[in-house]
Image (cartoon, rainbow, N blue to C red):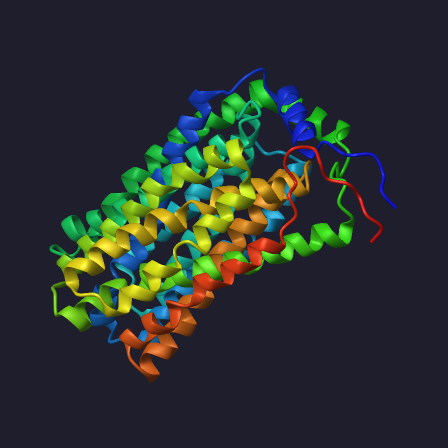
Amino acid sequence: MLSKPAPVKQAVQETAENVAAGTVFPMLFALSFSHLLNDTLQSLIPSIYPMLKGTFGLSFLQVGMITFTYQLTASILQPFVGRYTDRKPKPYSLVVGMVFTLGGLLLLSVAGSFPMVLFSVALVGVGSSVFHPEASRIAHLASGGRHGMAQSLFQLGGNAGSSLGPLLAALIITPYGRGNVRWFALAALLAIFVLSRVGGWYKRTALRTDRKKAVTIPPDVSALSRRKVNTALAILMVLIFSKYFYLASMSSYFTFYLIDKFHVSDQFSQIYLFIFLFSVAAGTMIGGPVGDRIGRKYVIWGSILGVAPFTLLLPHANLFWTGVLAVFIGIILSSAFSAIIVYAQELMPGKVGMIAGLFFGLAFGMGGIGSAVLGELADRTSIEFVYQVCAFLPLIGLLTGFLPNIEGGNIRKTAG
């Protein structure tokens, strides 16, 4: 039986209007800049993999275990942090998270054994698990209803930071030694200062409204049945698996692929990795604003499935075309995440932090598992074979066709 139409998008926009009279761009820029600093520090870890592999005599599986350890701590806690701060906001929790990152970096610069390396990256992961859901939630509050734009701007900082890490590692760490990681503690201290200002704004301006929102918003304004909501969330999680398994192959093993296939230097391979990650950053701003305009589902469809021709060509390209294809892959694939986050938040309004934590955590978790699995596959076969297998992952984007159209106020609840 059909019931009254439920204007999902309108309900979410009205919620945002209660939270803020308009988009608070200073806070969005501060969060994006903090995200840039945070992810620059995180991306140092895979950038120095060749150095760590040589220093400690690691196998590809052990390299994958470094990523797995970091991603595990960065993923498991995120949904719980998001759910907790949805209920009990903590204005200065972002500062606490950055302190963990600072400690992990300092320890990584002096680690003398493989277990100590694992412990140091685990601390960085804990910092990430606190930062992402809470910063994403505050960005949502500061959006003034322009949720896709706010999420993309927030993500732009993170992806830009991820692209800077390999470049800075090539310029500062690789030529002079792992001890120079400690200089990046200055970036962590700068992030702590900026995030303390964000926490002050949140405490003075947004906390009272956020608490009011938590009381007045019904737990689910979607007219979709719970079964359909859960099915849609499951499809989004599978799409995250596809996206981040492929990204794991690029972020963790692209340098090794270039060195093995084209016999380039470590520094040259890091520059190519920077080009790819910079392309990811450049494509980030596409998904959110376009999703606000034409619908998240179409952005998700075009991003994940649309990248397939380029991933299928990559294993067969020469060095020049490998760089060109990496640019297209980065731009197209990166547009999906902001759209996925906002789409999921619109499916379950009122649970912004929990959804952000769930999907950021899932993204990190899939990246970590992917790194470990692909590292084992590389040890058993070859690094080139890894890219031949991963080329087919974007075809999972066909599942996007089963997502409901939740924009436009035309959703009707069915018995279910």
The answer to whether 174 appears left or right of 333 in the picture is left
- Residue 344 lies left or right of residue 305; in this view the side is right
Identified at 46% across, 47% down, the residue is 336
In the depicted structure, whether residue 393 falls above or below residue 57? above
Q: Is residue 324 above or below residue 143?
A: below
Percent x, y for residue 252? Answer: 32, 63
Q: Residue at x 82, y 54 (%)?
A: 416
Q: Position of residue 20 (x, y in %)?
A: 59, 19
Q: Which residue appears at 16% of the width and 63% of the height?
A: 319
The quadrant where residue 14 appears: top right
Residue 104 x/y as whole percent: 37, 52
User: Does any portion of residue 65 appear in the rendered image?
Assistant: no
Viewer-side residue, 268 vs 191: 268
> Is residue 326 among the parts visible in the rendering?
yes
Q: Residue 82, position in %: x, y?
A: 60, 43
Residue 158 is left or right of residue 264, and the answer is right
